[in-house]
Amino acid sequence: MPESREIYKTLDLALRVGELLLSSGAGAADVSATMLSVARACGLRGVTADVTFTALSMSYQSSVDEPAMIQMRQVTHRELDYEDLTQVDHLVRALVAGRVDRDEARSHLARIVSSGHPMPRWAATLGFGATGGGVGMLLGGDVVVTLIAAVAAIGVDLLQRAMSRRRLPGFYQQVAGGLLATLIAVATAATHVQVDPSRVVTAGIIMLLAGVGFMGAIQDALTGFPLTAAARILEAMLATAGVIAGVSGGLTVGRMIGVDLGHLNPGAAGWADLPGMAAGAAICAGAFAFSCYAPLRSVLPIALIGGLAQAVFYLAQDRELGPAWGSAIAAVVIGVVSYSAAGRFKVPPLVIVVPAIVPLLPGLSIYRGLSLMAEGRNGVLSIAAAAAIAIALASGVILGEYAAQPLRREARRLETRLAGPRLVGPLRTRTRTRTRTRTRTRSVKRSRV
């Protein structure tokens, strides 16, 4: 039986890996399965893992008459860094394959976590500006709307980063971001530039809307983690409420200085034609991946996949399939293509899936529903539409991964809680063990002969 100190080292390594994955947006099922894979690779059997929104725990009991060894780790918010996520994914695969041992993995993980970003922070800010400009193109905006959206995205990122350094809660950061984006629209209207205020505000706040968190919540619910899903839904709703408060404050300031934008209707500002939508979605997806420090080799493929998915969504809408079915078909395409692209460019599928799906996220539907409720009107239909789109996106991506990467029976035995293909982490099978068993059997037969 391993010594207690060795067991705690193994549990600590698995928990640190799980912390980085969960804070990088990985689903709870992927995090749980990866932690179990790390423990098994280090020689521990019978380990259990539990994942919640803010905490991870693992336990190991060597026998029924021994007390269980339990370790927990709090998950703090970290800035998205897909370069770190990719390196950790490669590290876990090397550990499972036996190319590195546990102590080497611990040292390598410490270097990954303690190292800085691969590029300066101002480059990521410019990337967010390009993301906002891509959204402006996606919404059918002209050059003026695209430039305003880019400026608003840069300003919101700088403002939220300054507030984050002062450790202000995320809700207040969302309020400030919505206020700044709306004030930029007010300033544009004061100059008598002929633009649609709804389109300007929509493009300015799109990066604040919690579509990624909402889709992640649906994914956790589909894969059997309802508590984590509920926490993510609550966080998404609270973040969107902050945006609504900020936009309302900006409209009030505009009326006080004599600039009335009228009744805004974000999400109903219109869409571009097919080439414009595809180009805007490609820029949005690629720039978002760049801003999240994705490996540079994957940025262009992500942009192409994002543009392809938006084209598929446009064609589905043109056939009057509805937004939910159109989103589902586009998500299936993303799931199928991202698995092949991830293997070719040596990144986890999650690094490709999340940026490529950003242009399709239902953040605007969430915003419209909550804003209508705040005005005393019926916003349930918009919230229901957002939920339908999020379910379609999450289930479509998982179905696409099923089509590209069928789960083997061995993987299902090892990872009983995994309800779908892995977006990050290795699929550990017993292929090597079986090969060794066959080799030994053949050698025994030969020796007997």
Image (cartoon, rainbow, N blue to C red):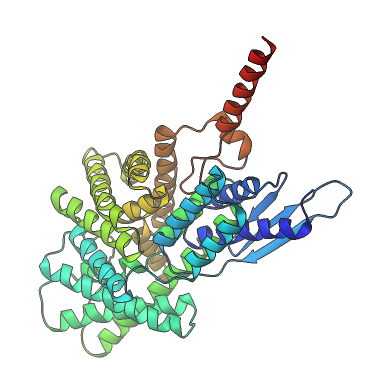
Q: Nearer the viewer, residue 101 or 67?
A: 101
The x, y position of residue 107, in whole percent, is 55, 63
Q: Residue furthest bottom?
A: 257
The x, y position of residue 417, in whole percent, is 61, 42
- For the question of whether residue 248 can be seen, the reply is no
The x, y position of residue 392, in whole percent, is 41, 44
> Could you tell me which residue is drawn at 64 percent across and 65 percent down?
73
| Quarter containing the C terminus | top right
- For the question of whether residue 157 can be seen, the reply is yes
In the image, residue 329 sits, relative to residue 148, either above or below, namely: above
In the image, residue 208 sits, relative to residue 286, either above or below, namely: below
Is 427 left, or right, of 328 in this rendering?
A: right
Q: Nearer the viewer, residue 3 or 248?
A: 3
Q: How many marks?
A: 0
Is 225 left, or right, of 321 in this rendering?
A: right
Q: Quadrant of residue 137?
A: bottom left
Q: Quadrant of residue 119?
A: bottom left
Q: Nearer the viewer, residue 439 or 317?
A: 439
The x, y position of residue 138, in whole percent, is 21, 57
Q: Quadrant of residue 330?
A: top left
> Could you tell me which residue is drawn at 71 percent across and 44 percent down?
45
Q: Residue furthest top?
A: 449
Is 131 left, or right, of 410 in this rendering?
A: left
Q: Nearer the viewer, residue 169 or 388?
A: 169
